[in-house]
């Protein structure tokens, strides 16, 4: 799905969730190739070529979306008092559990968002990036898990503004192809398990 199409869809769904006319919703999809720049992007992060960059209203810095990457946009109401960091940690946990089910051990890196692979290569490698926005208590944007995507894009930008680490994918870590739809099925199961206890804390609005 083209990024702008998905962004418009997110905004429409967000308005309906805020109004109480739609249940809380998560989108799982794959984008056409695109660079997106969050609010904290620096000019030095931008592509070294003439690639188009879409400026977006999420947190974080520049990243890439494209074929072979599973993107999840949960559009859900946060319980009060709002804890945005806790929401980020929940999305990271979904990716960590998903990777583990495919035999990839991942972790968090203090001071950095997202999900990371660690040694034996002795270098941190980012496998999933997180960037969100909360408006009127309802989230937008989300997490992108590199499944089987071409990683050459990372040579053209400073991914997430990080210069001292690499980007990886499930396929690169396992040295074998990984089917994106199979990952999506597992990811969805963990997404439900991780988010549902939190969603139950939010008093539901009556649907029109």
Image (cartoon, grey):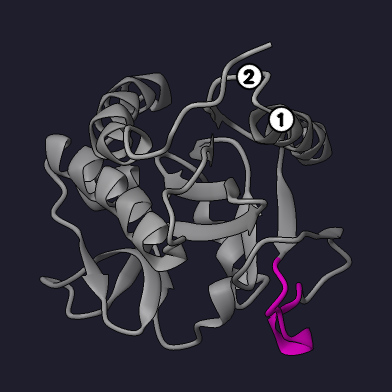
Q: Position of residue 188 (x, y in %)?
A: 34, 26
41 is within the stretch colored magenta: yes
Q: Is residue 23 visible?
A: yes
- Could you give the CA–CA distance between mark 1 and mark 2, rounded to whole angstroms? 8 Å
Instruction: Give whichever of 17, 207 is nearer the camera.
Output: 207
Instruction: Give whichever of 73, 106 is nearer the camera.
Output: 73
**Is residue 37 toward the left or the right of residue 97 in the image?**
right
Q: According to the image, label 2 marks what residue?
A: 22
Q: Is disc 1 in contact with disc 2, using a CB cutoff of under 8 Å?
A: yes
**Is residue 59 toward the left or the right of residue 114 in the image?**
right
Q: Secondary structure at mark 2?
A: loop
**Residue at image coords 71%, 44%:** 33
Question: Magenta residues?
Answer: 38-47
Q: According to the image, label 1 marks what residue?
A: 19
Q: Secondary structure at mark 1?
A: helix
User: As drawn, which residue projects farthest toward the top?
Assistant: 208
Q: Position of residue 208 (x, y in %)?
A: 69, 11
**Is residue 104 toward the left or the right of residue 82 in the image?**
left
Q: Is residue 102 above or below residue 161?
A: above
**Residue at image coords 42%, 63%:** 83
Q: Position of residue 13 (x, y in %)?
A: 70, 28
């Amino acid at each position: 799905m083209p990024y702008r199409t998905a962004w418009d869809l997110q905004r429409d769904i967000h308005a309906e969730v805020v109004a109480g006319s739609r249940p809380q919703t998560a989108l799982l999809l794959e984008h056409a190739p695109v660079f997106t720049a969050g609010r904290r992007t620096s000019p030095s992060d931008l592509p070294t070529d003439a690639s188009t960059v879409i400026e977006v209203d999420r947190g974080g810095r520049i990243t890439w979306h494209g074929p072979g990457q599973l993107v999840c946009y949960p559009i859900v109401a946060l319980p009060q008092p709002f804890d945005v960091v806790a929401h980020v940690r929940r999305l990271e946990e979904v990716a960590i559990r998903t990777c583990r089910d495919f035999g990839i051990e991942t972790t968090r890196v203090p001071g950095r968002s997202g999900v990371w692979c660690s040694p034996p290569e002795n270098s941190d490698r980012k496998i999933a990036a997180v960037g969100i926005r909360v408006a009127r208590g309802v989230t937008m944007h989300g997490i992108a898990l590199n499944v089987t995507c071409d990683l050459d894009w990372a040579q053209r930008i400073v991914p997430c503004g990080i210069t001292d680490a690499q980007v990886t994918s499930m396929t690169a870590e396992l040295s074998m192809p990984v089917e994106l739809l199979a990952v999506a099925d597992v990811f969805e199961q963990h997404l439900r398990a991780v988010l549902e206890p939190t969603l139950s804390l939010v008093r539901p609005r009556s649907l029109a």
